Image: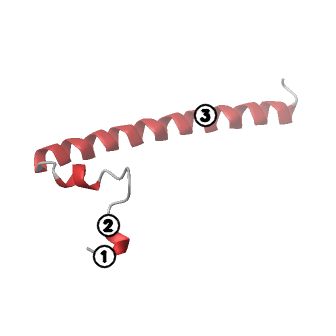
């Protein structure tokens, strides 16, 4: 193992290496759900900000 690939303190590389294929698939699915949820929240916040800016620009608010 080279220095660049050696696990650092607090790195969970060994934990990942011990997961079974099924556990890795579950982890990947869980991460995908989290990413979709985060993307949805960011999209909603961006939409809300855009609406407020447009309303302020038009002088409605």
Mark found first going from the N terminus, 3 or 2: 2
* C-alpha gap between disc 1 and disc 2: 6 Å
- Residue 42 in which image quadrant: top right
Q: Position of residue 2 (x, y in %)?
A: 31, 76
* Neighbourhood count class around disc 2 (C-alpha, 10 Å): few under 14, some 14–19, many 20 upward: few
Q: Is residue 54 above or below residue 28?
A: above
Mark found first going from the N terminus, 1 or 3: 1
* Neighbourhood count class around disc 1 (C-alpha, 10 Å): few under 14, some 14–19, many 20 upward: few
Display colour scheme: secondary structure
The residue sitting at the bottom extreme is 2
Nearest the camera: 46 or 38?
38
- Residue 5 in which image quadrant: bottom left
Q: Is residue 30 above or below residue 61?
A: below
- Tell me the tag on residue 6: 2
Label pair 1/2, CB-CB below 8 angstroms: yes
Q: Residue at x 79, y 30 (%)?
A: 55
- Tell me the tag on residue 2: 1
- Indicate which label's residue lies in the foreground, 1 or 3: 1
Label pair 1/3, CB-CB below 8 angstroms: no
Q: Position of residue 28 (x, y in %)?
A: 26, 47
The local secondary structure at tag 1 comes to loop
- Tell me the tag on residue 45: 3
Quarter that holds the C terminus: top right
In the rendered structure, the answer to whether residue 23 lies left or right of residue 8 reads: left
């Amino acid at each position: 193992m080279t220095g660049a690939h050696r696990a650092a303190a607090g790195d969970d590389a060994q934990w990942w290496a011990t997961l079974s294929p099924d556990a890795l698939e579950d982890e990947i699915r869980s991460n995908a759900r989290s990413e979709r949820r985060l993307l949805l929240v960011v999209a909603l916040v961006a939409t809300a900000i855009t609406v407020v800016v447009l309303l302020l620009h038009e002088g409605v608010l």
